[in-house]
Image (cartoon, grey):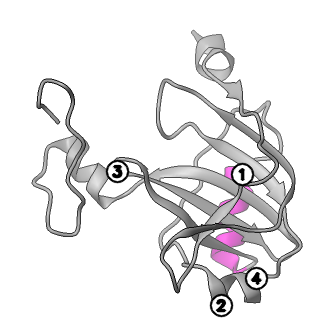
Amino acid sequence: MYYLQVYAFYEPVIATGTDDVQLTAKVSGEPEVILYEDFRAIDANSSPIRYRACFTTPMGLSTLSDTYKEYVGAAPRVAPGWFDCFDAEAIGEDLEAGRAMAFTSQRNITYGIDRVIAVTQDGRGYIWHEINDCGDKAYDGSPLDDTCPPPPHDTDGDT
């Protein structure tokens, strides 16, 4: 069981090398590619929140914060120990201490799931998925409010 939880579900993500790291622009509200290198990522089909990635960027936090939307309340999710570039506790500490900032990569990359990117002062970057407010409501059965997009429907017409 341990092997299944920690190793079996994850697969390496094949990097495109051109659009793996995107942030949502303040002006257009659309994701835009930023400069990045050293991209590594893992994902699993078993859950929409298992995505983790690491990269570096030469772009400074002041440029990023002037241009791209901040993500309020970001909480990095723990990655498997063997994916050693992603330390959720250290990323969280950097966010709390102001040594890193969290940005919106893409809202509702899957319904109710946002892709979040944190970048540190020294240009290390981290990507993960978080359940947003609409996702929380959809998954626990609470009524969706006007701020939520309509949920996708399956072929039977159920959500």
**Going from the N terminus, do you reach mark 4 or mark 2 first?**
4
Please state the extent of the stretch shown in magenta in the rendering: 87-98
Q: Residue at x 24, y 42 (%)?
A: 152
- Residue 123 lies left or right of residue 152; in this view the side is right
Q: CA distance from mark 4 to mark 2?
A: 8 Å
Q: Are marks 3 and 4 in contact (CB under 8 Å)?
A: no
**Going from the N terminus, do you reach mark 3 or mark 4 first?**
4
**Going from the N terminus, do you reach mark 3 or mark 1 first?**
1
Vertical placement of residue 40 versus 127, above or below:
above
Vertical placement of residue 2 versus 144, above or below:
above
Vertical placement of residue 85 versus 153, above or below:
below
Q: Amino acid under label 4?
A: Leu
- Residue 157 lies left or right of residue 83; in this view the side is left
Q: CA distance from mark 2 to mark 1?
A: 21 Å
Dot label at residue 66: 2
* Residue behind mark 3: 112
Judged from the image, the secondary structure of the residue bearing numbered disc 1 is: loop
Q: Callout 2: 10 Å neighbours few (<14), some, many (20+)?
A: few
**Going from the N terminus, do you reach mark 4 or mark 1 first?**
1
**Going from the N terminus, do you reach mark 2 or mark 3 first?**
2
Q: Amino acid under label 3?
A: Gly
Q: Amino acid under label 1?
A: Asp
Q: Nearer the viewer, mark 4 or mark 1?
A: 1
Q: Main secondary structure of the magenta part?
A: helix
Q: Callout 4: 10 Å neighbours few (<14), some, many (20+)?
A: some
Q: Callout 3: 10 Å neighbours few (<14), some, many (20+)?
A: many
Judged from the image, the secondary structure of the residue bearing numbered disc 4 is: helix
Q: Residue at x 66, y 54 (%)?
A: 127
Find residue 111 and report its horizontal and vertical position in percent: 35, 47
Q: Nearer the viewer, mark 3 or mark 1?
A: 1
* Residue behind mark 1: 20
Find residue 139 and report its horizontal and vertical position in percent: 24, 41
